Amino acid sequence: MKIYNKTKSNLISEAKLADTFISRTCGLMFKKVLKEDRGLLIKYNPRLKSRTIHCFFMRFTIDLIFIDGNKRVIDLKTLQPWRIYTPRGMPSWVLEVNEGVIEEKNVELGDVLEF
């Protein structure tokens, strides 16, 4: 699926959807690379109270774009392998993309995305 920034009128990434227990749990673990202009859109389980993200077993740094239920960007983070991060707020989604995409695509807090 394509992830657009409606606020900036640009394409952020094409992303695979991770909305099952297995796809959310595995994420990008053990992958050697993430192809350019590709990402993983993870749908949080609404029953879980924790929104913590980890990069265990990852081989590369990623940018994280946290998105609320209204598809508004509520937090941004660059995370290196073997690190943990808890986002601000209660995101409904997180888009994992290659390091540098946030800056390159000028993604900012408050931007509204479309997917």
Image (cartoon, rainbow, N blue to C red):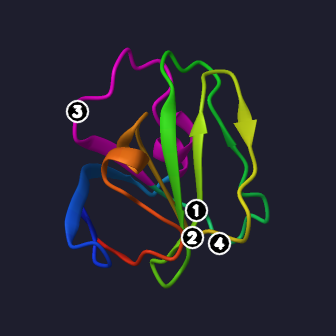
**Residue sitting at x 71%, y 57%:** 87
Mark 2 vs mark 3: in front = 3
Mark 1 vs mark 3: in front = 3
**Residue sitting at x 49%, y 41%:** 63
Is 45 colored magenta in this rendering? no
Disc 2/disc 4 C-alpha distance (Å) = 7 Å
Q: Which residue is mark 4?
A: 46
Residue type (three-letter) at the residue carrying disc 1: Tyr
Q: Which residue is mark 1?
A: 44
**Residue sitting at x 65%, y 72%:** 46
Q: Position of residue 47 (x, y in %)?
A: 71, 70
Mark 3 vs mark 4: in front = 3
52 over 56 or under it: above or below: below
**Residue sitting at x 43%, y 74%:** 111
Quarter containing the N terminus: bottom left
Disc 1/disc 2 C-alpha distance (Å) = 5 Å
Q: Secondary structure at mark 1?
A: loop
Residue type (three-letter) at the residue carrying disc 2: Ser
Q: Which tag, 2 or 4, sits closer to the chain's start?
A: 4
Q: Which residue is mark 3?
A: 36
Disc 1/disc 4 C-alpha distance (Å) = 6 Å
Q: Which residues are magenta?
A: 21-41
| Mark 4 neighbour class, 10 Å CA radius: few under 14, some 14 to 19, many 20 or more | few
Residue type (three-letter) at the residue carrying disc 4: Pro
Residue 33, disc: none
Residue type (three-letter) at the residue carrying disc 3: Glu
Q: Are marks 2 and 4 in contact (CB under 8 Å)?
A: yes
Q: Are marks 1 and 2 in contact (CB under 8 Å)?
A: yes
